[in-house]
Image (cartoon, coloured by chain):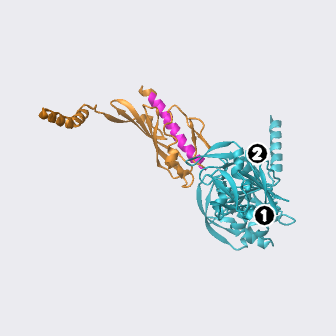
Amino acid sequence: MRREVFTIKRYIKIIPFILIFILIFTYPIQQEEVLRLDKYEDENIKKVYLIQMNNEPYQLLQKVSVKGYKDEIVMFIQIDMQKESINKLEIIYQNETSHYGGHISEEWFLNRFEGKDTTLTLEIVKMSAKKEEEVVAVTGATISSQAVVRGVNKVLSNYREIKNNIK
Amino acid sequence: MKKLSFIILLVFLITIMIFGTVVSAEDGEFVISNLKEKDITISVEKLKELPVVEKDVTSVDSSGDEDDYTVKGALFSDLLESINASKEDLKAMQLIAGDGYSIEIPEPVLKNRQIILAYEINGEPLPDKVKPVRVIIPEERAMYWIKNLTKINIIEMVKTVDIDSLVVLETAVNQVGKVDYTYYESEDKAVNVANLVDQIGLNTDKRTIAFTAADGYEKDEQVDIFRDGYIKITGDHAPMFLSPDIPKGMYVKDVLYVGYGSTSLASIDSAMKAFTTTTIDGTEGITLAKVIKEAGLISADKYKLTASDGYSVEVSSKDMENGIVYLENGEMVRCAFSDLSKKFWIKNLYKIEPIK
């Protein structure tokens, strides 16, 4: 009788390992594929990448360049095609004046774009955002902020066209 | 058709004759008005006879764009000296360009900054659109760096107005509606200045109001610009004067006093940053005497202290020396006295007035 109890205890100890083993070998393999959609590129939208997961559109990544106050502003914008919203906006080049338009690279400004619905046409406002499509400009840097919004709107418009065509 | 064209041309020419000659200076000259009995015409040749100033400067415009220049010209102070006048005698002046653009140079800028009347930039004579001179005020925003200067209008000395009441800003703002104001990453609250001054019942016949900030910065601003703006009452540098419609360089951080006609709006929060504190009954604050003195409130033997609910007390000037004003929990302005009973310890202090 004592011997039997001892045997069950031993099996209990290895159950988690068995479960992990089952999980690893039964988990569906995700196949990611990146496609360049160069026919949707133009003088502003420099690169368009469609990321597919198991042949399903998953994310659209676009590199866009717009004229800022002093120089070009180059951004990468990632759209979540499942949620139909902006997932991430990253400024990869800008040369705006440091204490003014230079703030467009700050996380707190970029966060104002994340989660914005792809059906929107964004607008810059100066004091506070009251509507979903409104984005508050960096204080004292309306022109640079406006340039970022212009770039994002180009990307959103391009996304809507791509979405219609790949349906 | 020809007749119509002729009439349009005639109207155009008349318009040019009427409005195109607002400033009467010839090319290569500008005029100084209201300094002497008659207008004084200054030529670039005259400026070139004055000591030459050459300086590397950086202009920052309203959008933050920066440009570096090497400028050559004469100092405005040297020009005044050459016509037996002094910058010290001036209160303010208005610069007017050929296209009608004008801007007022306030007293602090006039007194504390070097003003260069530049006739050469980067080793080159000025382009036609910029001639006869460009005003350069190093360390000030490009809005003052007027091109194509045609007139300097000296503004008459403004008589100092006696301050006969002090209104506590933190209490006053509670009586008006607040709006959201996003300042960089911060979601702050602000009040519209016009609403605030109308609620308090302030009036002025002056063209300007006077800011004093906690760090000692002083600036005059036009009443209309002030009324169209906002006072941000939360977040960094509050209370702060700002507006979405003016360049960032015109914002005033940590406003301590605003002289509006005969009333001084005073921020106790900024006073706590600007002045040495005193402790009464374990509470730290600024002496009432200091707050009213720095505001320029008329001296009196007694002062009336009024709360926002209308409750008021009279306090002698001696007790004002032994009383403090402080901000409780960052919101309520209260006062306390070492020698007076608690009935004098007003909550929500709103106004201080001398009893004549």
Amino acid under disc 2: Gln
Earlier along the polypeptide chain: callout 1 or callout 2?
2
- Circles 1, 2 touching at the beta carbon (< 8 Å): no
What element does badge 1 sit on? helix
Q: Disc 1 vs disc 2: which is toward the camera? A: 1
Q: Which residue is drawn at 51% across and 53% down?
A: A95
Residue B173, above or below B296: above
Using the image, tell me which numbered label, if any, was put on residue A63: none
Q: In which quarter of the image is the N terminus of chain B?
A: top right
Percent position of residue B351, x then y: 76, 53
Q: Which of B100 and B102 is in front in this view?
A: B102
Amino acid under disc 1: Ser
Residue position marked by numbered label 2 in the rendering: B199
Percent position of residue B66, x then y: 58, 57
Would you say residue B173 sits in the magenta stretch? no
Chain ID for orange: A
